[in-house]
Amino acid sequence: MDPRERKYSNGEITVYWKPRECIHSSVCYMNLLEVFNPRKRPWVNMSGASTRKIIDVVNQCPTEALTWKWNDEEKNKTVTEADTNHIKFKRPHDFEKKEEDSILEVEQDEPLKIRVMKNGPYIVEGSYVLTRADGSEINMMGMSSFCRCGNSNSMPFCDGNHRKTGFKE
Amino acid sequence: MATNERKDITEITVFSNGPLKVSGNFKLTGSNLKLIETGNEIYLCRCGGSANKPFCDGTHKKIGINDKNV
Ligand code: FES
Ligand code: FES
């Protein structure tokens, strides 16, 4: 487990933060700075908004850097994919086990990893040369997400707009 | 500067109002990490409209892509 992982609770829900999954899409703080403020410590303030609002924004995280669950285990049993916009609803302990599958572990000479996210972007990880539409070339390294819905305002990258336009695939 | 020169550099090329071309050494998976395809060259839909997702099928020509502020 990554020692930088954090959890935050307001008594009703707990929000989990996995910094290694964070691709800095800025969706969380652009939508709810009262709760997600990267300049503050702790950066998550669970009393900054209602539970409903926090859930909505956590669901917009393009990766699983932010996830949530009810503190009342009974309520978690009834959570379905419809309650979360998450690509695939996973409780934090579910993906801790699958760490070895993580697309984050890049080794040298490993193929570039491209993951097609359900209803969301392509998540690309590794090192590669990116040629943008204007012909400029950049050496890329690490993790980024490319828009696949056609509606991002920061092409070619995903800016979270696929949520607003309801891209389904 | 690239410190570790690799013989097979993977490239992603963004086509204006068109798909992403990926060439070289790559591994394409679904969100469940199930393998869809590995290298050499593919064209990935970027317009959201392909009937053969994740691949481009030419639909972008009909529906366009929000590429104005690139
Ligand atoms: S896929 Fe996220 S904005 Fe298009
Ligand atoms: S980019 Fe060609 S069909 Fe979508």
Image: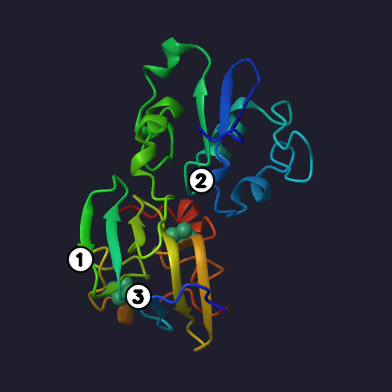
Question: What residue is drawn where x is 35% and y is 65%?
Answer: B48
Kind of residue at disc 1: Asn
Ligand 1 lies under 8 Å from the Cβ of mark 2:
no
Is residue A140 placed above or below A35 in the rendered structure?
below
Chain letter for mark 1, please: B
Q: CA distance from mark 3 to mark 1?
A: 15 Å
Image quadrant assignment for residue B20: bottom left
Work out whether residue A26 or residue A143 is closer to the camera in this orientation and state it.
Answer: A143
What SS does tag 2 mark?
helix
Q: CA distance from mark 1 to mark 2?
A: 28 Å
Residue A153 lies left or right of residue B58; in this view the side is right
Q: Position of residue A47 (x, y in %)?
A: 73, 26
Image quadrant assignment for residue A150: bottom left
Question: Residue A21: which numbered mark, if any?
Answer: 2
Residue of label 3: B63
Ligand 2 lies under 8 Å from the Cβ of mark 3:
yes
Residue of label 1: B52
Is residue A23 placed above or below A11 in the rendered structure?
below
The type of colouring in the image is rainbow
Q: Position of residue A84 (x, y in %)?
A: 43, 34
